[in-house]
Image (cartoon, rainbow, N blue to C red):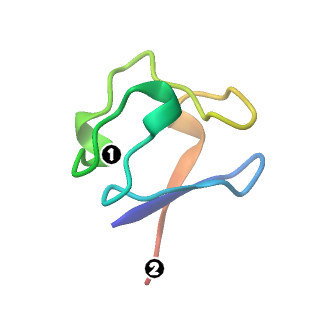
Amino acid sequence: MKYRCVVCDWIYDPELGDPDGRIEPGTSFEELPDDWVCPVCGVGKEDFEPVEE
């Protein structure tokens, strides 16, 4: 499942990970470190919501 940042609409796709944040492809949203932040606007995981695909 993908997750959308409610602040800037950036989408976290587990299949892609977050290369700039050193998050490997295949990393689920739940597995992201607690201190991970949106690479676009810098908010934390609490500001993301699941995206219905």
The residue drawn where x is 37% and y is 20% is 34
Residue at x-position 32% and y-position 22%: 33
Relative height, residue 52 to residue 48 (above, below): below
Query: Viewed as shown, does residue 32 lie left or right of 46?
Result: left
* Residue lying furthest bottom: 53
Give the residue at the far front of this rendering. 19
Looking at the rendered image, the quarter that the C terminus falls into is bottom left
Q: Which mark is residue 52?
A: 2
**Viewport quadrant of the N terminus:** bottom left
Q: Residue at x 28, y 38 (%)?
A: 24
- Residue 9: percent from the left, percent from the top? 71, 57
The reply, left or right, for residue 5 in relation to residue 25 is right
Left or right of 9 on screen, residue 14: left
- Above or below, comparing residue 7 to residue 3 in the picture: above
The image quarter in which residue 44 lies:
top right
Distance from Cα at disc 1 to Cα at disc 2: 14 Å
Q: Is residue 51 above or below residue 36?
A: below
* Earlier-in-chain disc, 1 versus 2: 1
Q: Are the residues tagged 1 and 2 within 8 Å (C-beta)? A: no
- Closer to the camera, 43 or 26? 26
SS assignment at label 2? loop
Identify which amino acid the numbered label 2 is placed on.
Answer: Glu
Q: Element at badge 1?
A: helix
Position of residue 29 measured from the top left corner of the image (x, y, whole percent) = 33, 45
Disc marking residue 41: none
Residue 2 position in % (x across, y down): 42, 64
Tag 1 residue: 29
Residue most toward the top?
35
Task: Kindly identify the amino acid type of the residue bearing the numbered disc 1.
Answer: Phe
